[in-house]
Amino acid sequence: MRKPGRITLGWWNTSLSPKTKENQATEEHKLYVAFVLFRLLNERWVDVMCLCEVTPDDIENISDALGDEFKIYNGAFREKRKKFDICIIYRMQIVEFLGSSLVSKPHHSGTTVYAGQKVEFNINETDETLVLFIAHWSSRLYDYADSPNKAHLGMILQSAVHECITSRNNKVIVLGDFNEEPFNESISHHLGASRDIALVKKKPGLLYNPFWRHMMYSALHPNSDTTFIHGGTYYYKNDDTSRWKTFDQMMFSSDFISGNSWHLNETETTVFSDSEFISYICSSKSKFDHLPILSVIERVQNG
């Protein structure tokens, strides 16, 4: 049963429609996505579930399977030469959609660089604005780690976050599949997402990134059977040194660390998986390669 005074947020790269294979998912893949979403929405009580690698057709299929308590923000569209592939399932009782915009900047080459989407919700319980910056950055197949382009994306996103916070919209969460890890400079330096929670409390311009804790297997040697556990959020079957990466992350503005309204409950910041899901991820026959991530924010009890 859903508890009052809390909002559960999720992110998942569904692999339904990757860039080069849109609307080609098998029925088995579609059914497993539906099964996972059912569990997330009805067992884990996720209130705001962000998805990527979805097309308008995928979103329509997902929408048909949802209950009446949910709506979907459709962020899968084309802007000039850029194609976006996200959507957000949200529980209407908990949040109300306010609006969305693109996070972008003109490039000297004459093109436009897109760093993500800004989506605003009203938190019904406290009548406050929750701002989500949602990103799905280029695969490392096309754009290598800590590339100049990734650095540029981090800076564009950081500028948008800073503008939001200085306009007193302090409740900001940046989330997505960055195809970068927490330690990459595009995230830690250019976006300003820190693992140092004490510093984030002192410097409200920084974001707190709890996903530093999710870069390794949870099992410790000698109890290190990793058969059915994860060592990150993304599994790349062809890596020769470390197949698990933590590309999927949520980062929180300082207000969720030291604010007086809502705070991050880090004990519930998790990577969602079970033995069956891990088997799918690790199978050479499966197209799944990302696990969902979850976080919870809770009302601060004053007095």
Image (cartoon, rainbow, N blue to C red):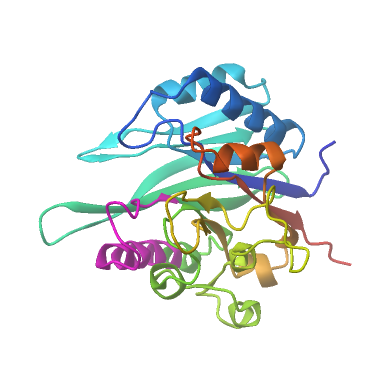
Give whichever of 259, 116 is nearer the camera.
Answer: 116
User: In the displayed structure, does residue 143 sit left or right of residue 81?
Assistant: right
User: In the displayed structure, does residue 275 sit left or right of residue 31?
Assistant: right
Q: Quadrant of residue 55?
A: top left
The answer, for residue 93, to whether it is visible in the render is no
Give whichever of 121, 183 is nearer the camera.
Answer: 183
Q: Is residue 212 above or below residue 26?
A: below
The residue lying furthest to the left in this view is 109
The mark tally for this picture is 0
User: In the displayed structure, does residue 201 sit left or right of residue 101?
Assistant: right
Q: Is residue 72 magenta?
A: no
The image shows residue 67 at horizontal and vertical percentages of 67, 21
The residue lying furthest to the right in this view is 303
- Give the residue displayed 30% in from the left and 34% down from the top: 20
The image shows residue 50 at horizontal and vertical percentages of 54, 41
Q: Is residue 282 above or below residue 287?
A: below
The answer, for residue 56, to whether it is visible in the render is yes
Q: Which residues are magenta?
A: 135-162
Quadrant where the N terminus sits is top right
Quadrant where the C terminus sits is bottom right
Q: Quadrant of residue 83?
A: top left
Q: Is residue 144 magenta?
A: yes
Q: Is residue 244 above or below residue 212?
A: above
The image shows residue 133 at horizontal and vertical percentages of 47, 53
Give whichever of 208, 122 is nearer the camera.
Answer: 208
The image shows residue 106 at horizontal and vertical percentages of 19, 57
